[in-house]
Amino acid sequence: MAEKMAMGGNPVVGRAGWLRAAVLGANDGILSTSSLILGVAAAAVAPHTVLITGAAGLVAGAMSMAAGEYVSVSSQRDSENALLTRERRELREDAEAEHQELSAIYVERGVDPHLAPKVAEQLMAKDALGAHARDELGLSEATTARPVQAAMASAAAFAVGSAAPLAMVVISPAGFLAPLVAGASLVFLAVLGAIGAKVGGAAIWRGALRVTFWGALAMATTFGLGTLFGKVA
């Protein structure tokens, strides 16, 4: 039998998972696009070229996130379907053994040993596959992999994050593009880091500091490389 997985189905947990994914997607959008913008700007190119480059990075990054998330979640969905197919076959071939297995799971979770078989029997009478999917495999409607939804959410989160440094390019006065993009992006990253830490139950200041540090390092590195290549060119 398949190894038991963590139980799902809690809508609050589900929402927290999606929020965390959205925060991470937006974080990637801010960091990758701002770093790209700073690297190109450091090479002393025209502002409109920087804007076009950033916009291209937004589109490419969003599509990449969507494709990667779709492939990843599709693989998860395939695994879930394989588990359900095997469970369906086992229920068809030996329903009594499956009933005993479900009873044992309930006993392990604290149900009275005399009551557990009755609970398992009633649940299996209503929806045998659903009961085993939920309580044996840890699968539920709330945690079911949805590739298209995941791809669209990742792409949207990345695009929203990328739009922030791009907006700074649009409103930046001449000569202040790099510091404005860098400063605003670090603020955005700190806010997202705090939100991610809050959702995960960690210390807010630690989450904000961590993502800000790595963001500053990434932007400084690309800016330095852009400056170097600009001088060489």
Image (cartoon, rainbow, N blue to C red):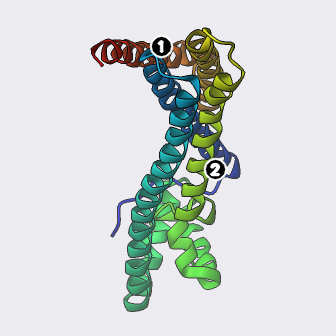
> Can you say which quadrant of the picture contains the C terminus?
top left
The residue tagged 1 is 216
Q: Tell me the kind of residue under disc 1.
A: Ala
Name the residue tied to disc 2.
14
Identify the residue at horizontal 49%, vertical 19% (top origin). 41
Q: Position of residue 131 (x, y in %)?
A: 56, 72
Q: Position of residue 83 (x, y in %)?
A: 40, 72
- Decide which of 188, 123 is in the foreground and name it: 188
Mark closer to the chain start, 2 or 1: 2
Q: How many marks?
A: 2
State the residue in front, 8 or 196: 196
In the image, what residue occupies the spot 37% across and 79% down? 86
> Compared with residue 193, is residue 140 higher up or lower down, i.e. above or below?
below
CA gap, disc 2 and disc 1: 31 Å
Identify the residue at horizontal 50%, vertical 35% (top origin). 53
- Disc 1 crowd, CA 10 A, few/some/many (<14, 14-19, 20+): some
Residue 187 x, y percent position in the rendering: 64, 15
